[in-house]
């Protein structure tokens, strides 16, 4: 609250004592002493009434007159109304993908504990932190153009959050600081984090109806794959199988006539479409190679 006053007296004032009401007792207590006719009382709670009066100390600058000359103002009360937004938190986001060297992966490991993003943020100590009442966490998945409120943290000193997800960990986050008068930090920082797709294919399978390795499939699990364009060609370059299903599930038959193809080497190409923070994206380099089809009987 900004306090100011004027003294209509014939002498000169040289000092002012400011008194503030103790809301728990109703008694006025000395708050501060100043030499100017204004004062700022900070650290107050929005919507709570605070009351003050001022005692002035003056003099006629004459050695024959007593001093100080005291004068009391009227008592006045007001409620603070804060319209200033809190500081923006500084946000960082991390997940398990940061520790993966994708080009050297020999398996696409993935557990339920990996499907999470770890958020942490900081604000400046002092006035900024004192002004914060709670935090709101917003998440914008790749399939949604607008951020969604996913959590409210009611402790201003709690500056971490773990966001558990189910299929994709790509997306963008914002943390908004909110003060006790519902002012929100403006233009909060956005931090985006991506998936680390992984999709690996074997070089052989044995479709002999023995219940083991009868289907040509990718190594499981694979990670963050939306779809594929998988094609198999025979030695004459004829297309004999095609699917968009990432599980592939080729059983060794020719899709053109439904007959089982013979043992041998077949060539494949596979365009991979990955789940990314910007949506489904086609991988720059397609997979390609040879499949040894072994029937064994």
Image (cartoon, grey):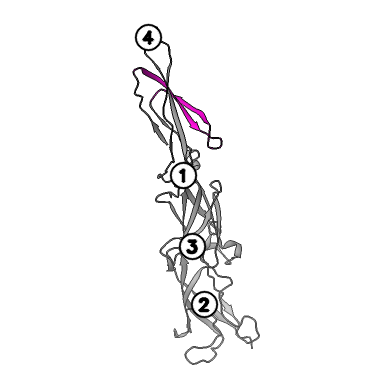
| Residue 168 or residue 47, whichever sits in front | 47
Few, some or many residues within 10 Å of mark 4 (<14, 14–19, 20+): few
State the separation of the CA atoms marked 2 and 1: 73 Å
| Residue 147 or residue 102, whichever sits in front | 147
Q: Residue 78 is drawn in which quadrant?
A: top left
Residues drawn in magenta: 10-36
Question: Percent x, y for residue 65?
Answer: 40, 10
State the separation of the CA atoms marked 3 and 1: 41 Å
Q: From the image, tell me which residue sits under label 2.
A: 290
Few, some or many residues within 10 Å of mark 3 (<14, 14–19, 20+): many
The disc placed on residue 62 is 4
The residue shown at (54%, 79%) is: 291
Find numbered disc 2 in the image and state the secondary structure of the residue it sits on.
strand
Find numbered disc 3 in the image and state the secondary structure of the residue it sits on.
loop
| Residue 207 or residue 49, whichever sits in front | 49
Q: From the image, tell me which residue sits under label 1.
A: 47
The disc placed on residue 170 is 3
State the separation of the CA atoms marked 2 and 3: 32 Å
Of mark 2 and mark 1, the one earlier in the sequence is 1
Of mark 3 and mark 1, the one earlier in the sequence is 1
């Amino acid at each position: 609250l900004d306090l100011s006053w004027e003294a209509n007296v014939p002498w000169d004032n040289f000092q002012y004592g400011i008194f503030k009401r103790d809301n728990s007792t109703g008694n006025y207590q000395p708050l501060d002493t100043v030499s100017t006719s204004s004062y700022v009382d900070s650290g107050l709670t929005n919507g709570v009434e605070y009351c003050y009066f001022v005692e002035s100390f003056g003099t006629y600058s004459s050695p024959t007159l007593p001093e100080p000359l005291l004068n009391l103002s009227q008592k006045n009360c007001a409620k603070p109304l804060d319209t200033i937004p809190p500081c923006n938190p500084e946000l960082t986001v991390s997940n398990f993908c940061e520790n993966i060297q994708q080009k050297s992966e020999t398996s696409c490991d993935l557990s339920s504990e990996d499907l999470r993003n770890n958020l942490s943020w900081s604000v400046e100590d002092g006035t900024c932190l004192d002004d914060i009442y709670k935090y709101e966490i917003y998440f914008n998945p790749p399939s949604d153009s607008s951020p969604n409120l996913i959590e409210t943290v009611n402790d201003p000193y709690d500056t971490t959050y773990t966001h558990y997800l189910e299929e994709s960990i790509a997306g963008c986050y914002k943390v908004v600081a909110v003060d006790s008068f519902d002012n929100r930090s403006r233009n909060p920082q956005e931090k985006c984090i991506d998936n680390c797709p992984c999709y690996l294919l074997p070089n052989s399978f044995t479709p002999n109806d023995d219940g083991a390795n009868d289907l040509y499939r990718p190594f499981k699990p694979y990670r963050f794959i939306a779809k594929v364009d998988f094609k198999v060609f025979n030695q004459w370059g004829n297309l004999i199988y095609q699917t968009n299903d990432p599980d592939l599930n080729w059983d060794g038959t020719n899709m053109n006539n439904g007959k089982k193809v013979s043992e041998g080497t077949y060539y494949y190409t596979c365009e991979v479409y990955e789940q990314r923070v910007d949506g489904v994206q086609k991988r720059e380099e397609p997979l390609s190679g040879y499949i040894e089809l072994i029937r064994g009987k």
